[in-house]
Amino acid sequence: MPFFSTTPRPARPLRLIAPWLAAALPLLAGLGILYWQAERDLAASAHDTAEQALAQFELMLDNVADSANALLPLAGQPCADATLALREQVTRRPFVRSTNLALDDHLYCSSLFGEFSEPINPGDYVGGHLWLMDGNPVTPGQALLVYRAFNDEQTALATLDGYHLANALRMIGREQSVLLKVGDNWLSPDGLVHDDTLPTFGVAPTQLASQRYPLSVSTGYPAGETWRWIASQYAPLLGLLVLLAVAAGTLCHWLLKRAQSPRAELARALEANEFIPYYQPVVRSLTGRWSGAEVLMRWQHPREGLVRPDLFIPFAEHSGQIVAMTRHLMHQVAEDLRPHAEHFDDDFHLGINITAEHCQDLALLDDCRDFLQGFPPGRVTLVLELTERELIRPTPVTHQLFAALHNLGVMIAIDDFGTGHSSLAYLREFKVDYLKIDQSFVATIGKDALSGHIVDSIIELSGKLGLGIVAEGVEEPVQRDYLTERRVEFLQGYLFGKPLPLDEFIDALRATS
């Protein structure tokens, strides 16, 4: 059946948050990678933009500086003699707006006005060469970048119109803001000169200084630009990442639901008393009389019908529910068989399977005591059959439990002897009363000489150890005769009866009395 699994159910808090974690982890990891890559892209873009802007400003200043240096030897000559040369520089060199000559820090000649008189303060020029000024009397409020060339008392000035600077800032910084800084003043793309603190950028802040002129360029992106970049540049990857996160969360939810459903279903079935006992008779080989029965658990599922034990017992053992299910089974067997105990021969054996988990809890002793108290003394012998799906560890609790069980009159049998890796170890560690020969050996009697030798060896071993022996899976008379000849006392199999529900078992028992 599809709803059975041997995967243990996770704890409830984990079940609730695990799908969200499964979705969140790849989503967060993917977003982290995208965020890191976006920051790298933005940092590279900002650096490239700053380099382009710096290169452009250096190119402009190269023309302005060349113009000033070419005019420097004329400083001191009469303005009438130098005016033509000043105007020639303005017309011939790109980006040069005006040129001026000064002597002893006093401007006396201009390409715009000819003779002119104005003092010059060398302290206004950063590094003695550059001054970013907020206009002059001719063009107030319009940025100018002035380059000063000087030699002793001689000075030549060349100005760069702020229009060209602002236009370069706008053209180069289309994706982000670019600022030009000269000393304490800085120019924004709108062409305005500021003397306050240079703005900071939240993402990829970049500042490059010129190696040739006392200026620097700053650029970057506003806060939050990284996420906007991810949304615009990585939209397909972002969509795929969200899809993978949803798929991971959905898969986790499905797996957990699949893992928890069998456990929840078993708990529901236990509460609804859907686990019922079936009884397979065990007969004495010499008389053919029923000497007992093995109790087998079946699940009467409301939708699936009768469920085979191999479909739910392994999961019940693995999930830790087998103890509660066995306790329920023992209680139900006692309730079912108590009214019919008068039909039992004395010392009627009732075998019930137990697992490694039962053997680590002294509560099993109380369960067995309650079971036996439901029958008249001496009428029923309880036989606990050790299954070998899980190894039973010989702990102090186990030894104490087995000793107390023997004192109570409970017998211990090793089920399917010869097939488990621990059968011989159990004989050494625990006080055992019966061996049950596995049906796989019994089925080959008369057909496989090797298996016949194994059966003979088990019978001989049980005799030497003084153990009772039960042969399972007897289906043919030749098997019965072979085992009877070798004094195997108890036989079990379809030749004598298949597992039966209570009513059919009691009717068959009465018929054999």
Image (cartoon, helix red, strand yellow):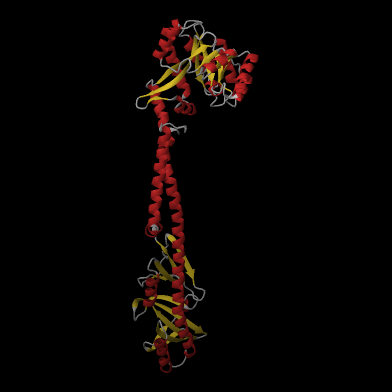
Q: Nearer the viewer, residue 418 or 378?
A: 418
Q: Is residue 335 visible?
A: no
Q: Nearer the viewer, residue 377 or 119?
A: 377
76 vs 401, left or right, is: left
Q: Nearer the viewer, residue 242 or 71?
A: 242
336 vs 438, left or right, is: left
Residue shown at 37%/87% (left/top)? Answer: 112
Decide: is 133 above or below 317: below
The image shows residue 359 at horizontal and vertical percentages of 54, 21
Q: Name, please, the residue furthest toward the bottom.
A: 81
Residue shown at 48%/22% (left/top)? Answer: 323
Q: Is residue 35 visible?
A: yes
Q: State which quadrant residue 224 falls in.
A: bottom left
The image shows residue 358 at horizontal and vertical percentages of 52, 21
Q: State which quadrant residue 138 falls in.
A: bottom left
Decide: is 98 above or below 510: below
Quadrant where the image shows the N terminus? top left
Q: State which quadrant residue 262 falls in.
A: top left
The image shows residue 235 at horizontal and vertical percentages of 37, 57
The image shows residue 481 at horizontal and vertical percentages of 55, 14
Residue shown at 49%/74% (left/top)? Answer: 214
Quadrant where the image shows the C terminus? top left
For the image, the number of numbered tags is: 0
